[in-house]
Amino acid sequence: MAAPAMKAKSAYAKKSPKTAKAGKAKPSKVGSARSKAGKTNVFKKVSERISGSSKAGNKTIVIALGGNAIIRRGQVGTINEQLKNLDHSMEVVAKLVKKGYHVVISHGNGPQVGNILIQQERSIEVAPKMPLYACVAQSQGLLGYMIQEALYNKLHSISIDMPVVTMVTQVLVDRNDKAFRNPTKPIGPYYHTERDLPPNWHIIETLRGIRRIVPSPDPLKIIEAEAIKDLLGKAVIIACGGGGVPVVRDKVHVTGKKSMPGLYGVDAVIDKDIAAAELARTLKADLFIILTDVEAVYINWLKPNKRMALSRMNIKEAKEHLDRGEFPVGSMGPKIEASVRFLENGGKKVLITDIDGLADALRGKGGTIIEP
């Protein structure tokens, strides 16, 4: 039976304020005053602390693409729109590669996997339907190809002969994770009525309609981690797309006859930012960049007169803001949580900004830096 429909909280159902207005907010004076030196140049500070020079050396950067880096607000998401957006997004990434950084890219897949699900529903009478985890894998290949094409062309335009590869990435989760008993992650399209929905779906009601919700378990291990490490410096790697394909160990075999050891996909969606943080931790990244649809982290977001951008935070401050509810679950919350996880497990620095502001943020002229 479907779970009882739940009314979505207004903070998640309302449309976010336009980022153009948010961009006018001034960075927090408190954050800016803490360390002017630390805000001058993100790359220089990371490199100097590790090697004593400003050269990139073997420094690793993990970039989590999201927000308008792939599909911009108001677009329907045609392949031409996405390729055009990625052509712009990959310009800065290509410059990082040219500087000598080892770059690993992760990405969201919400609109793309949603479209795959719609395509499946519309063709159910002529083609077999695939489970959600297989759709996540499909989206990794689709988006990986588009990022590969855009970045390959940008690299070759500046005479950099560096391969760009996409790795379909499995991420281990615990089949006993409490998320499987309490699905919370909305996926797919909005429906006007639950009459025609499968009876085993869990659903949630929002102001825009009914949506399917699925489990969002914690990532435990990136299965292809060693292969990704082997490729560092030899290629730009696209991995953990859409949070990775969630898999569990020792599931009942597809024949249904007995339990078989191995890895098996499960219908769930791992939060893309949490998975990217695990990727950055596993690779011991020197810098973890989270790209979203605003140029910095804000507090008092729903109070335009008091809205304030934060230029810097430490772990303690980030947790305090989370506890006060400054960062909603459906927007900035997972990004801050991902940042904290990365930093608490040996990470050095996180930068949160949007793709349009990334170049300036890397020069210390925008974005939000979070450090231990």
Image (tube, rainbow, N blue to C red):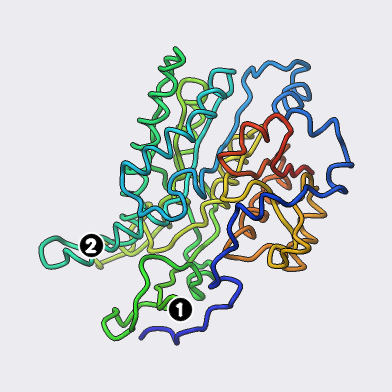
x then y, percent, for residue 218: 55, 59
The residue at the point 41 percent across, 44 percent down is 169
Is residue 117 placed above or below 63 in the rendered structure?
below
x then y, percent, for residue 56: 65, 19
Determine the secondary structure under disc 1.
Answer: strand
The residue at the point 69 percent across, 26 percent down is 43
Tag 1: residue type? Ile
The quadrant the C terminus occupies is top right
Determine the secondary structure under disc 2.
Answer: helix
Q: Which residue is mark 1?
A: 204
How far apart are the two marked residues, 2 and 1, measured between alpha carbons? 21 Å
Q: How many marks?
A: 2
The residue at the point 64 percent across, 55 percent down is 21
Question: Left of 124 or right of it: where is 154?
Answer: right
Q: Which mark is residue 120?
A: 2
Tag 2: residue type? Gln
Nearer to us in this view, 350 or 276: 350
Few, some or many residues within 10 Å of mark 1 (<14, 14–19, 20+): many
